[in-house]
Amino acid sequence: MTVLLVRDVMTIGVPVCREGEPCGTVAARLSADALVVLDGYGVACGWLTRAALLAEASRDPVRPVGELMDEDIPTVPPDIPAAAAVELMRDRGVEYLFLMHDWPGEARPSAMISRAGVARRLAAGDD
């Protein structure tokens, strides 16, 4: 029996924006469910869900994304079982986890997984 790993269900490529960009501008172009926020050097400094971004954009479209983001980016390694990643999401109260490049010690987003995506694969018998 093959165990489904995070790398088997991850989506390569992560939507990003700069921390100083207005919420309304980012919301207008974002089609994904979550994104990583980058600082002025291109290093990951936070993250947001599309729902939070859209809600804030309707209230204050010029508010910088950096004022709204969560600085604690939920991350996961690629080589753990996908079912364990779902448990991590439950424990943290999030729907998304990000995989990061740390070269050279500067976190940059590379891929992401969602709880719904993993659940679909597990339900399909990909376990």
Image (cartoon, grey):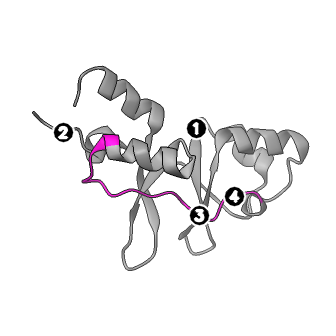
| Disc number lying in front (2 or 4) | 2
17 is higher (above) or lower (below) than 50: below
Q: Is residue 1 magenta?
A: no
In this picture, residue 44 sits left or right of residue 119: right
Q: Which residue range is magenta in the image?
A: 68-83
Q: Which residue is mark 4?
A: 69
Q: Which mark is residue 33?
A: 1
Amino acid type at image mark 4: Met
- Label 2 SS: loop
Please state, as top left, top right, bottom left or bottom right, where the N terminus lies in the image. top left
Q: Rounded to the nearest whole Å, what is the CA distance between mark 1 and mark 3? A: 17 Å
| Disc number lying in front (3 or 4) | 3
Among the two numbered marks 2 and 4 on one chain, the one whose residue lies closer to the N terminus? 2
Amino acid type at image mark 3: Asp
Q: Quadrant of residue 28?
A: top right
At horizontal 32% and vertical 27% (from top left) the residue drawn is 121
Q: Which residue is mark 2?
A: 3
* C-beta proximity under 8 Å, tags 1 and 2: no
In this picture, residue 72 sits left or right of residue 97: right
Among the two numbered marks 3 and 2 on one chain, the one whose residue lies closer to the N terminus? 2
Q: Which residue is mark 3?
A: 72
Q: Is residue 79 magenta?
A: yes
Front position in the image: 94 or 12? 94
Among the two numbered marks 1 and 4 on one chain, the one whose residue lies closer to the N terminus? 1
- Label 1 SS: loop
Front position in the image: 94 or 15? 94
